[in-house]
Image: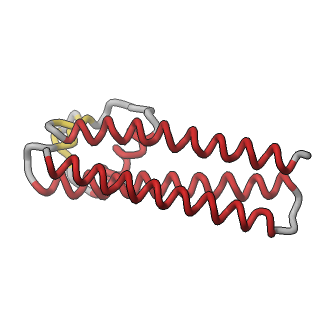
Amino acid sequence: MIVIFSTSLLIISLCVMLHFEALRKIAKISDWLKIRGRYRVTVVVLVGILSHTLHVWLFGLGYYFIVNLNHDNQIVSLDGPVSSFLDCVYFSFANYTSLGYGDLVPEGPMRFMAGTEALVGLVFIAWTASFLYLKMEQYWK
């Protein structure tokens, strides 16, 4: 459980730093761009989506590490355990967005990390939405 907690904490910390820097940089760059407001908003949205995608890949890497570390933690499909990196990333996408298809399910203590990722996704999506609202309000004046 300590490995899972530590891995979750490390990934969350990396995601916070990554997202903060992405939003900070795009705020500076979007003000510098000499393009119309709607195109600036498009660029900001694309950077936000890229940042979220990187978060998902970081969590996917964490799942891949944990699944291959020991057999107490697994991601299970109807056909049995999965352990490929892309399956871990797919699981991470479904989990981060709280979409939860249910075709892949975590087993063992790794469920803590999966729950944490869903909470992180909710917080970061709200953070991005707030940032986009402020930018759109700024460009529409």
Q: Is residue 8 above or below residue 32?
A: above
Residue 116, quarter of picture? top left
In the foreground, 79 or 48: 48
Residue 24, quarter of picture? bottom right
In the foreground, 16 or 70: 16
Q: Is residue 131 above or below residue 69?
A: above
Whether residue 70 sits left or right of residue 42 in the image: it is left
Whether residue 20 sits left or right of residue 11 in the image: it is right
Q: Residue at x 91, y 46 (%)?
A: 141
Q: Residue at x 20, y 48 (%)?
A: 4
Residue 68 percent across, percent down from the top left: 15, 56
Residue 135 percent across, percent down from the top left: 76, 49
Quarter containing the N terminus: top left
Looking at this view, name the residue that lies furthest to the right: 141
Q: Residue at x 58, y 43 (%)?
A: 127
Q: Is residue 37 above or below residue 118?
A: below
Q: How many marks?
A: 0
Whether residue 79 sits left or right of residue 24 in the image: it is left
Residue 103 percent across, percent down from the top left: 31, 34
